[in-house]
Structure formats: C-alpha cells, structure tokens
Amino acid sequence: MSKRKDSHKTERLAVLDYMERQINAMKTMNRLGTARNYSRARNSLRTFLDGHDVSFKRMDESLIMSYNNWLECRGVVKNTISFYMRILRAIYNKAVKDCIAKQNSPFKNVYTGIDNTRKRALDENVIKKIMMLDLKDSPTLTLSRDIFIFSYCMRGMSFVDIAFLRRQNFDGNYITYRRKKTGQRLTVLVEPCIARIIRRYAESSEGSPYIFPIISSDNPEDAYRQYQTALGYHNRKLKELAKRANVNLPLSSYWARHTWATVARNHNIPVSVIGAAMGHSSEKTTLIYLASLENSVIDKANRLVIGSINKMVSP
C-alpha cells in the first residue's frame, strides 16, 4: 500500500521541482559548478513557463520545440540554447531512470550539439615567447603567465582544477587530482617546468592547503566564489600578457588546454592518448583506452609536447 502511494507521489513530481532536487543533490556532493549551470537552465525554463511548473508528461516534443523557438525569438545564441537543451535532456533522462517519466524522446528535433567556434590554439613558439617575457614589474602578470604555462605543461589542466589543487595532491614526483568537470582521476608526472612553477609559489602559499595563491577559503561555496572572481581576473591579465608578447589574440585560460591538444596532434600523438591525457572520459573510444593505457605512455606523450619548455628550464 505504501509503495503504491510513494509511486503515485513520484509520478506527480513536476519538472522544476525535480530539477531543484537535483541541484540540491549536486551542492551536497560539492559539484557547485554543475549546480550553477543547472540553476541557469532551470531559471530559463521557469521564465518560459511563466513561473508555473509542469509534469513530465507535459514535457513533450511540442513543449520543447516551443521553448526552443521562444529562446530563439529572445536572441539567445545557438550554443546557449543547446547548453540549456542538453541540461534539460539530462534531467529528463534521469527522471526516466528514476521511473518518474516515460521515455518519449522530446529532444529529438532540437539542436543539442556544440558549434565549432574559432580555434583557440597557439603555436609552440608563442608559448615559448610568453614564457620568456620579463615580467619583474608585475607580480600579477607573472602569476597569470605561470598559471597559463602550468596549465599547458599539465596536459591542458583546467583553471578550476589548478585553483583547487592542494598540497596533498603533489607527492614530489606526481600530481594526482580529479577533474571538477567530470570527476576523472588524472595522474601527471611532474616535469622540470612544472616543478619550477610549484617552487616559485611554495613560500607565498605557505600555511595554505592550496598550491597556488588563487583561493584561500576552505568553505566550498566561498571557495567557488573566489575561484570565479579569480578566473575573470586571470583572463583579463592573459589579454594584457598577449599584448606584451605582441600576440594579437584574445587569450584566455582555455587556450592552454586547446594548445596542448593541438601541439600533441602535431607531434603525431594518437587521439586515444590525447583523450586519455586530458581526461576526456565522456568519449566512448577514449574510455576504452583509459582502461588499458599505461601512465608511462601518457607521460612520454606529455614530455614530447612540452620538451621545448623543459629545455628552457635549468636543472
């Protein structure tokens, strides 16, 4: 009897309410970035629905198409619409898995891909040029430059993972961490160019659990806010850095990651190794290789990519 009542209650659970529960669960698991993205999608859908909630039964192809058209009429760009649709699809699929909704594929006729934007990869020589800049007059530019080079040398490590990198993640020879975005566990051999940057900030971050002086709070929400502020500041500094290096490009933190992948490809490193090195756990092909690929293969690939940077570092 109680099971039937619970089932009936579950069936009546509405979309916005269910999304709110998922967002709260993410916050509990400290997945604050994903929670914020889901909140953005929920707020957009709530505005479209004029503040009213709807059942999953009403979340059909017609409703999704109407929402898609509404977003287009408001001038929302294609990639942002796709961003919302992918989140809603994930929520819908989770509801199906939880037996709250029946699978009727309401997203089959809306775009859920990612448009190719302009390339964000630098030439190897530009990376070396940035590394050689004399920045003694600007400690803030020096920090942004070092974080950018560190990201590149760490196989395109994301800024969020660098910001939250703790001393306990570094054992002297390897850095082991989990990607905030995917939860994928990565282990990176500490090459000379990486070690030098870590040593440079060892004193300034003394007493802090973090390797870099980017965030200071141990409170998850405060730390995430500090990270967001730091990211915006870092990207502004990178644009200053580009001007100093006479690089006419809108440099941002993501360029280091894209550059590592591009340089790796130019060195004829297999796509499977590149994917494994960067923690692309969402790709089925990469997942197959992740299970069997030796860390030493990935370490050799990274050493090949950042070889020219290592040569610039005195032993």
Image (cartoon, rainbow, N blue to C red):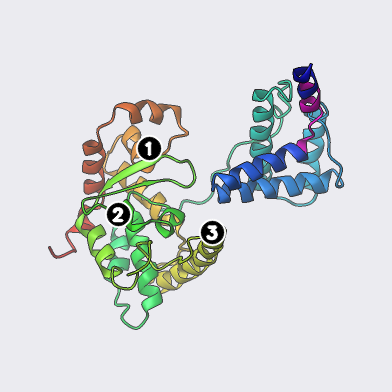
| Residue 70, quarter of the rendered image | top right
Q: Is residue 223 left or right of residue 88?
A: left
Residue contact at pointers 1 and 2, CB within 8 angstroms = no
Quarter of the image for the C terminus: give it.
bottom left
Residue at image point 43% right, 59% down: 163
Report the span colored magenta.
7-15
Residue 111 position within the rendered picture, expressed as x and y whole percent measured from the top left = 66, 35
| Foreground tag (3 vs 1) | 3
Q: Residue 141 in magenta?
A: no
Residue at image mark 3: 224
Residue 203 position within the rendered picture, expressed as x and y whole percent measured from the top left = 29, 72
Q: Residues within 10 Å of mark 3 (few under 14, many from 20)?
A: many
* Of pointers 3 and 1, the one earlier in the residue sequence: 3
Residue at image mark 2: 153
Residue at image point 52% right, 65% down: 226
Alpha-carbon distance for marks 1 and 2?
A: 16 Å
Quarter of the image for the N terminus: give it.
top right
Amino acid at pointer 3: Tyr
In the image, residue 28 above or below residue 122: above
| Foreground tag (2 vs 3) | 3
Residue at image point 62% right, 42% down: 25
The residue tagged with tag 3: helix, strand or loop?
A: helix
Residue at image mark 1: 275
Q: Residues within 10 Å of mark 2 (few under 14, many from 20)?
A: many
In the image, residue 178 above or below residue 105: below
Q: Residue 9 in magenta?
A: yes
Alpha-carbon distance for marks 2 and 3?
A: 24 Å
The residue tagged with tag 1: helix, strand or loop?
A: helix
* Of pointers 1 and 2, the one earlier in the residue sequence: 2
Amino acid at pointer 2: Cys
Residue 123 can be seen in this image: no
* Of pointers 2 and 3, the one earlier in the residue sequence: 2
